[in-house]
Amino acid sequence: MQKCFYLETFGCQMNVVDSERIVSMLVEIGYQRVNSAEAADLVLLNTCSVRDKAERKVYGHLGRFKPIKDARPELIIGVGGCVAEQEGEKMLAEVPYLDLVFGTHNVHRLPELVQQAEAGHRRLSVTGFLDRETRLNLFPQRSELDGVTRFVTVMQGCDNFCSYCIVPHVRGREISRPSKDILAEVELLVAQGVREVTLLGQNVNSYGNKEPGELNFAQLVRKVAAIRGLSRLRFTTSHPKDLSDELIACFAELENLCHHLHLPVQCGSNEILKQMNRGYTREEYLETVKKLKLACPDIRLTTDVIVGFPGETEEDFQQTLDLVTEVGYADAFTFLYSRRSGTAAAELEDKVGARVKQQQFDRLLALQQENSRRIWASDLGRSVSVLVEGESRQGEGQMFGRSTWNRIVNFAGSPELLGQTVTVKITKVFRNSSLGELLPG
Ligand code: SAH
Ligand code: SF4
Ligand code: F3S
């Protein structure tokens, strides 16, 4: 009988890429993916621990699986990703019906663990970081997936240790994949019909810095952009302190580099930026933004902001509001500070009450929503270039793609357009997507 697995993925693109890998490994050992835990022999959660809420969600979901396990004790339940890395064996102690825990550096061991569990060896946990050589050999490779857009991992881990952030603790130190492998992968993807790649890493613009003789990130971007047949190129996430002039120049010079950059600012106050260990000042950040806009006048920026960092005053917060207004982000992900045990900021005293923080958060959100609305509304009546990615969820005869600014655009069209870059005139703008009419090409 066909064995089935159910997999849910939380968190960032790192986990999405790891999950792609999990899927292909499980298919190789005879499993088929299903859409409900009830129908599965193996249930997996690929988890995120960046904020407390994300972590709590994992335990909530595991609770949901308990009745299924009670009814079918042979069901294998496993947890991977960042919560698994952080908690390790403690998770087994806390969740008595959990069978497998596999950390971020041990995704490749999943098939072996599943086979052990099938043979009756349960309650297994593998966590801990691997050495550089082993990791380099294990870099995520292309998996067999359809689609015209793909993520290509160029580096993993983070050395920045922003004081609030758990990521370096659960993903390990930075490591860059050899550029020749990256270029070969992108060439292969393009030959298979992929038209857009996003170079992926926690901190892509420090790519190569630790590898003697390796290209730097701007050089890598240029080489990837030159691959014939690649219509579009993006990269994420960039750290403001590592955004070189050479990389900024790429936005002016490379035709297929999209005019969007996610540049997390986190806060607008120098005092808090220092406490956060971000490595740049407000002025330096604004200078970088100025250079980007000069190099690429229609670039649209998005960002991440944390509200309520320990010690943040109303004046500090006001500076964040001012900066958000000054930059004019097309979108922003706003977060309430969440204390992560093991990080440096977890030790800082936090006097501001939850209500004040929530009010500040709401003010920031309202400001950003208005900015976003205004920026996206300015597209009304404009003709934008859209890479067609698939059939739209809006209904039959509708296709969707994204503009250079990473905005979803729906329009009436046929599936033959898949993978083509078309021109769409924007007729309606919603909060998270736009609607348009296909113009004759
Ligand atoms: N490597 C990326 C993304 C890191 S996690 C980067 O450096 O930008 C994504 C976002 O989560 C961060 O940019 C930050 O805004 C937010 N975040 C991280 N830790 C957090 C915490 N402890 N509390 C609230 N938000 C946090
Ligand atoms: Fe976290 Fe900072 Fe690294 Fe981003 S750069 S992953 S926020 S430590
Ligand atoms: Fe979350 Fe881990 Fe990514 S903590 S944001 S899934 S690196």
Image (cartoon, rainbow, N blue to C red):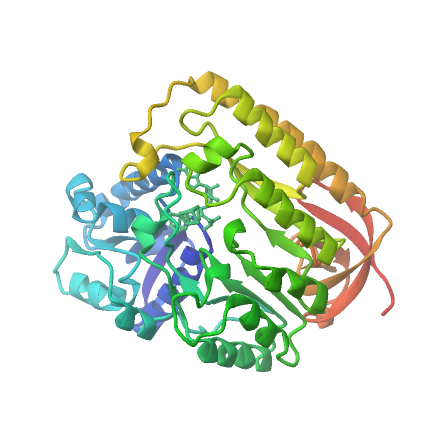
Q: Quadrant of residue 378?
A: top right
Q: Nearer the viewer, residue 223 or 337?
A: 223
Q: Position of residue 101 (x, y in %)?
A: 23, 53
Q: Is residue 82 left or right of residue 300?
A: left
The reply to whether residue 394 is in sight is: no
Q: Nearer the viewer, residue 420 or 60?
A: 420
Q: Position of residue 436 (x, y in %)?
A: 80, 53
Q: Nearer the viewer, residue 129 or 269?
A: 269
Q: Position of residue 298 (x, y in %)?
A: 76, 53
**Marker count (numbered):** 0
The answer to whether residue 112 is above or below residue 327 is: below
Query: Which quarter of the rendered picture does the N terminus lie within?
Result: bottom left
Q: Is residue 387 left or right of residue 28?
A: right
Q: Is residue 180 left or right of residue 74?
A: right
Q: Quadrant of residue 93?
A: top left
Residue at (37, 23) in percent of width and height: 350
Residue at (41, 71) in percent of width and height: 177
Q: Position of residue 205 (x, y in %)?
A: 51, 60
The reply to whether residue 113 is in sight is: yes
The answer to whether residue 238 is above or below residue 264 is: below
Q: Is residue 217 left or right of residue 122?
A: right
Q: Seen from this angle, which residue lies furthest left?
A: 121
Residue at (54, 45) in percent of width and height: 264
Q: Quadrant of residue 125?
A: bottom left
Query: Which quarter of the rendered picture does the C terminus lie within?
Result: bottom right
